[in-house]
Amino acid sequence: MKERVQKFGRFLSGMVMPNIGAFIAWGFIAAFFIEAGWFPNETIAGMVGPMLQYLLPILIGYTGGKAIGGQKGAVAGALATLGAIASTDSTMFIGAMICGPLGGWCIKKFDQAMEGHIPAGFEMVINNFSVGIIGGILAILSIFIIGPACLVLTGLLKTGVDFLVSHSLLPFTAILVEPAKVLFLNNAINHGVFTPIGTEQAMEMGKSILFMIESNPGPGLGLLLAYCVAGKGETRSSAGAAAFIHFVGGIHEIYFPYVLMNPVVILGPMVGNICAIFTLSILGGGLVAAASPGSIIAEMLMTPPGGYFANIVGIAVGAVVSFLISAFLLKMFGRDASLEEAQAQVAASKAASKGQTAPAASGASVSAKDVRKIVFACDAGMGSSAMGATMLRNKIKDAGITGIEVIHHPVSEIPGDCQIVVTHHELSGRAAERAPQARIVPIKNFMGAPEYDALVKELAEARKGGDSAPAPTQESAAPSAANEILLEKKNIVLGCPSVTPEEAIRACGKLMVESGYVEEGYVQGMLDRQEEFSLAIGSHVAIPHGTNDSRSFIKRTGIVVMTYPQGIQWDDEVVRLVVGIASKGEDHLEILGKVVEIASTEEDTDALVDNTSADELYQKLNGLE
C-alpha cells in the first residue's frame, strides 16, 4: 500500500515539478503587474488569466502524457487537456492531471497494437494521424465527461479546504505533511494537491496559505538549530552548515537524516508547522505562487505586498517552536547515532520512493541482485546501442544468468523501469537526466568495453545462491519478413582506399540513397551524429547512422558494408570495417548481431577485412551460411 501511495504521489508531482518555473513566472507577473501588485500594468497583467487558464494546465497535461506515451503521448495529452479547459471557465489543473496521462496511455496502447503491422513507408503518416485522431477524440470526450467530472471533484476539494480553514483545522495537515516529507522525499502533497488548489485561491484572493504548508523552512530550521545546541559529536558540528543550506538554499532533504537518527524529534517540526500554519491563518499570511525551492529567499519573493510581516512571523514561529521541542526531545531521549548511517537510510528511502534499490556503500546506485532490465542508449537507438545490447545479452546468456532483459533505446526515450543504463560517456549526462532512477554505466567502446565483463561478473556473483526470475522475452532480432535480405551484394564494397571519416560517411550515404533506403537528408543526419560524438565503436568498426531527428528521411531498412584495408584514422581510433545503417524498426538487429559475432575484437575485424570475400560477407551477415 505504501509503495502504491508513493508511486501515485511521485506521478502527481512529476507532472507539476518540471513546470514549476512556469508557475513561478505566473506568480511574478501576478505579484508585480496586476492592479493590486507592486507595479500595476494592465497590458502585462493581461497575461495572468491566459497563463492560468491555458498555459499551466496544458503544460501539466503535456508532461503527464509524455511520461507515459513519449512525445506522441505528450501531444495527445495536451489535446485532451484542451478539451477539459474548453468545458468550463474554471482552472482545469485536476483535469490536466487526468487528461495528460490518459492521452499518453491511449497512444501507448495504440502503438503496441500496431507494432509490426504498419506497412513500410507509412510509419510517419500513421503516427501523425493516430495522434491527431486519438487526441481529437479525447478532447471531445473531455468537454462532455472529464471536464464536468473534474468540476465536481475540484468543488469537493475546495469544500474540504474551506472546511479546514473555517474550522481552524488547516494547521493539523502538518501531522501528515512532515512525516510524509521524511518518508517519501517528494513533493507529491505540495505540488499534487496544494499547488493546484492554492493557485486557484491566489487567482481569486491574490495569495494562498496552501503554498506555505509544505515549503515553510521554519520547522526544519528549528530542528537543525536544536542539534547545534543539544546534539552530540558529528551531528552537532554539521548541523550549523545544514541549517544554512536548508534555510537559504531550500534543500529540505538535508534535515531528514537528523530525523532518522532520532525519530522522536519529528514531533518538533510537526508541532512547529502546526503553530506556523495557525499563525499564518490568524495574520492572513500566504504566497502568490508556489515557492520552489522552499527557501527563505523564495518565500520572500513570492510574498505579496503587505504580507511580509505575516509570513516572516509564521516562519519564525515554526522555527522557534520546532527548536524548543526538538531540543527538549534531544536532551531527554536523544541517542548517539551515525550521521553517515542516517544518510544511508535517507538514500534507501529516496530510492524506494523512486522504485529503485538503495545506493550501496561503494556508490553503486542499484543492487546487482535486483537488476531486471538493462538499457543500452545512444542518440538514435538503432546503431551502437543495438550492437552493444546484443554483445552484453550474449555475455549474460553465456554466464548462465537469467531474468535480465537487455534492450536498446534512444537516450531521449529510456524507459523509467530500467535499473541500469549503459551509454557512451558523452551521453551519460543526458541518460542520468532521463533515467534518474537508474545506475549509469558510461563506456567509450561499444564493441569491446571492459565494463561489459565487469558488469556480467557483478551480476553473476550477486545471483549466486539466489533464485533468478524467469528470463523475460527479448526483443526479436529476426527480420520482419522471413526471406527479406537487408544487405544486398551490390552494397558490399571491399578494398576502399583510405579516406577521412566524413568521406566514409558520405560514401555510405551515397550507397543508401542509390539503393532507395534513404533520402538525401539522412546523409546530413549521419554527419550530424558524427559531430555529436564518434561513430567509431571500437574493434576497428564504425557504424554510420543518422540522428533520431533524421529518421524521417528513411524510406526502408537497409545496410551497406565497406572495408578499408589501410584503415581510417577515425578520431582516436583506427577503423577498417564500416557498416552503414538505415532502419525504420528492428529489422536490422539480426545483421548487427552477426557483426558482433564476427568482429567483436580488433583481431576478428582485421581477419575479416583481410581474408573475406564479398560473397562470404554476404553469406555471413545475412545468416545464409
Image (cartoon, grey):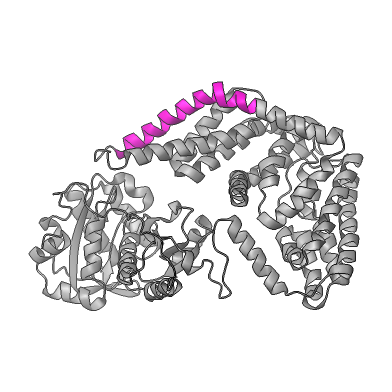
Q: Considering depth in this image, is 289 or 117 the residue closer to the camera? A: 117
Residue 141 in magenta stretch: yes
Secondary structure mostly taken by the magenta-highlighted segment of the chain = helix
Rendered location of residue 608, percent (x, y): 16, 72
Question: Closest to the observer: 607 or 396?
Answer: 396
Closest to the observer, 564 or 311: 311
Residue under the image location 87 percent in, 65 percent down: 329
Against 124, residue 566 (above or below) is below
Residue 38 point in image, percent of width and height: 82, 39
Q: Is residue 236 above or below residue 13?
A: below
* Residue 390 falls inside the magenta stretch: no
Which residue sits at x=16%, y=72%? 609
Decide if residue 500 is on the left or right side of residue 329: left
Give percent across and percent down for residue 478. 23, 53
Quadrant housing the C terminus: bottom left
280 left or right of 369?
right
Question: Residue reaching furthest top?
Answer: 144
Residue 222 shows up from this direction: yes
Number of marks present in the image shown: 0
User: What is the quadrant of residue 131 in the picture?
Assistant: top left
The answer to whether residue 41 shows anywhere in this view is: no
Please name whichever residue, 423 or 473, is drawn nearer the observer in this view of the structure.
Answer: 473
Return the x and y of residue 325 as percentages of the image width and height: 89, 60
Seen at 25% across and 61% down, the residue is 592
The residues colored magenta run: 123-151
